[in-house]
Image (spheres, rainbow, N blue to C red):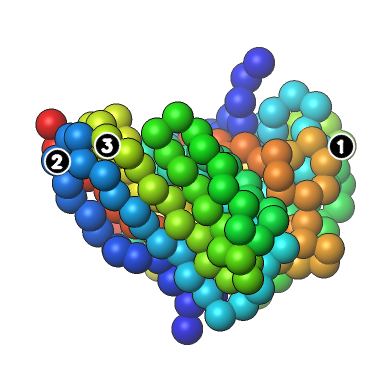
Amino acid sequence: TQLLEQSPQFLSIQEGENLTVYCNSSSVFSSLQWYRQEPGEGPVLLVTVVTGGEVKKLKRLTFQFGDARKDSSLHITAAQPGDTGLYLCAVPEGETSGSRLTFGEGTQLTVNP
Amino acid sequence: NAGVMQNPRHLVRRRGQEARLRCSPMKGHSHVYWYRQLPEEGLKFMVYLQKENIIDESGMPKERFSAEFPKEGPSILRIQQVVRGDSAAYFCASSPQRGLNTIYFGEGSWLTVV
């Protein structure tokens, strides 16, 4: 059983469309991070959410942390081809939550021109 | 300000050989993490090191794998007697302090075992 379940696993949309991807768990977390990974590269941290119900915006990306701190969503408005990539959510674990990240398996997003 | 540097970017080894992957953290970062991404799987934590110390190695396979982060020089992930199942992308990350809110990943080292 995966600690973090990401859905959908794959998503292919046209440029200009909106989309939402999800990261769900039955566990409660102190914080949650979203990353984007492009082919042949390492993941890049997009945002860290800490407070239940928190909403953070990064240009056309809106991140929300669930009220109970068990889940999160990423909404992209007016998607562009440059948004194509693997979107990963991750939570810190280990002593004082400072030693390791556990990742979901990701949502592979393709935005077609 | 250079990012996390990993080399080699691509490495091919025959079964039974040794693989050494190097990671130079960002300037000023003394915390290094190694992750592995197997084909069709997510990123999995392997080990967390701080200069000369292994802090958390709970994700390291019990045999053939070792990691170090010496006082001088890069962190090294060493895989002895490689097998085909070791073929994966290995990512290094670094942070300036304990805690994962400011963590930066390198571009990865792709190991292929033939």
Residue B114 placement (x, y as % from top left): 32, 57
The amino acid type found where label 2 is placed reads Gln
Residue A43 placement (x, y as % from top left): 49, 43
The answer to whether A84 is drawn above or below residue B68 in the figure is above
Parent chain of label 1:
B
Circle 2 residues within 10 Å: few <14, some 14–19, many ≥20: some
Query: Viewer-proximal residue, B2 or B24?
Result: B2
Q: Answer yes or no: do the residues labelled 2 and 1 have beta carbons within 8 Å?
A: no
- Which residue is label 1 attached to? B71
Q: Dot 2: what SS? A: strand
Q: Residue furthest top?
A: B1
Q: Say if residue A37 shows up in the picture.
A: yes
The amino acid type found where label 1 is placed reads Lys
Query: Viewer-proximal residue, B51 or A47?
Result: A47
Residue A89 placement (x, y as % from top left): 50, 56
Q: Earlier in the sequence, mark 3 or mark 2?
A: 2
The answer to whether A109 is drawn above or below residue A4 in the figure is above
Q: Say if residue A103 shows up in the picture.
A: no
Is circle 3 on the same chain as circle 1? no
The amino acid type found where label 3 is placed reads Ala
Circle 3 residues within 10 Å: few <14, some 14–19, many ≥20: many
- Which residue is label 3 attached to? A79
* Residue at (67% x, 41% y) in the render: B103
Comparing labels 2 and 1, the label whose residue is closer to the camera: 2
- Which residue is label 2 attached to? A14
Choose top left, top right, bottom left or bottom right for residue B86: bottom left
Parent chain of label 2:
A
Q: Answer yes or no: do the residues labelled 3 and 1 have beta carbons within 8 Å?
A: no
For the C terminus of chain A, the image quarter is: top left
Find the distance from the CA under tag 3 to the CA under tag 2.
8 Å
Find the distance from the CA under tag 3 to the CA under tag 1.
45 Å
* Residue at (71% x, 48% y) in the render: B100
